[in-house]
Image: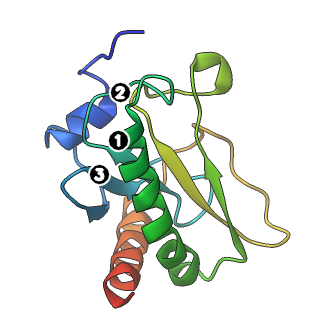
């Protein structure tokens, strides 16, 4: 599959669409999922173009996973979660809806079911509050 630079994440990276940013460095970007499966659901993407895990370079994959590992504890702690679910989909048949490689960091809570993948839009005010909590936890780490 050829990378489509008009995908939602490419537009976010170019500043053409808004997001609730959580973290950014020179190679990766993290922001709140607008259709969260749980409070604090965050996406981590590389800044370089790649459709999926097969398409991404090993170096870019390492940079992206490094960011996942760096911010995941801050997400867990700031959301007071019992655990974390890290998800990564490859291809439409696997559930991928945006064809820019990305990782989901989803806080998990004992006894609380996940909301559906690509379900309802989250409340922008709640997303903003959760993003701020996560940013503060990352800075404090």
Q: Earlier in the sequence, mark 2 or mark 1?
A: 2
Q: Position of residue 123 (x, y in %)?
A: 45, 58
Q: Which residue is mark 1?
A: 60
Q: Nearer the viewer, mark 2 or mark 1?
A: 1
Query: Disc 3 designates what residue?
Result: 28
As drawn, which residue projects farthest toward the front?
Answer: 58
Tally the marks. 3
Residue 85: x %, y % from top left: 67, 58
Q: CA distance from mark 2 to mark 3?
A: 12 Å
- What is the secondary structure assignment of the residue under circle 2? loop
Q: Secondary structure at mark 3?
A: strand
Residue occupying the point 56% across, 43% down: 120
Give the Cα separation between the discs numbered 3 and 1.
9 Å
Q: Earlier in the sequence, mark 3 or mark 1?
A: 3
The 10 Å Cα crowd at callout 3, few under 14, some 14 to 19, many 20 or more, is: many
Q: Is residue 92 left or right of residue 132?
A: right
- Tag nearer the camera, 3 or 1: 1
The answer to whether residue 123 shows anywhere in this view is no
In this view, 26 is above or below 108 = above
User: Do callouts 2 and 1 mark residues in contact (Cβ within 8 Å)?
Assistant: yes
Q: Which is nearer the eye, 82 or 67?
A: 67
Q: Nearer the viewer, residue 62 or 40?
A: 62
Q: Nearer the viewer, residue 36 or 76?
A: 76
Residue, x 24% and y 50% (percent of image)?
27
Color style of the picture: rainbow
Looking at this view, is 56 or 107 the one in front?
56
Classify the position of the C terminus by image quarter. Answer: bottom left
Quarter the N terminus occupies:
top left
Would you name the residue on which mark 2 appears?
Answer: 50
């Amino acid at each position: 599959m050829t990378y489509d630079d008009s995908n939602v994440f490419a537009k976010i990276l170019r500043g053409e669409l808004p997001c609730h940013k959580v973290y950014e460095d020179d190679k990766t970007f993290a922001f709140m999922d607008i259709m969260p499966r749980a409070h604090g659901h965050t996406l981590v993407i590389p800044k370089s173009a790649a459709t999926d895990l097969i398409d991404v370079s090993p170096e870019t994959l390492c940079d992206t996973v490094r960011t996942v590992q760096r911010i995941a504890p801050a997400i867990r702690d700031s959301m007071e979660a019992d655990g974390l679910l890290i998800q990564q989909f490859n291809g439409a048949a696997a559930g991928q809806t945006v064809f820019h490689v990305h990782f989901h960091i989803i806080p998990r809570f004992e006894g609380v079911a996940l909301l559906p993948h690509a379900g309802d839009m989250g409340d922008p005010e709640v997303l903003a509050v959760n993003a701020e909590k996560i940013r503060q936890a990352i800075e404090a780490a």
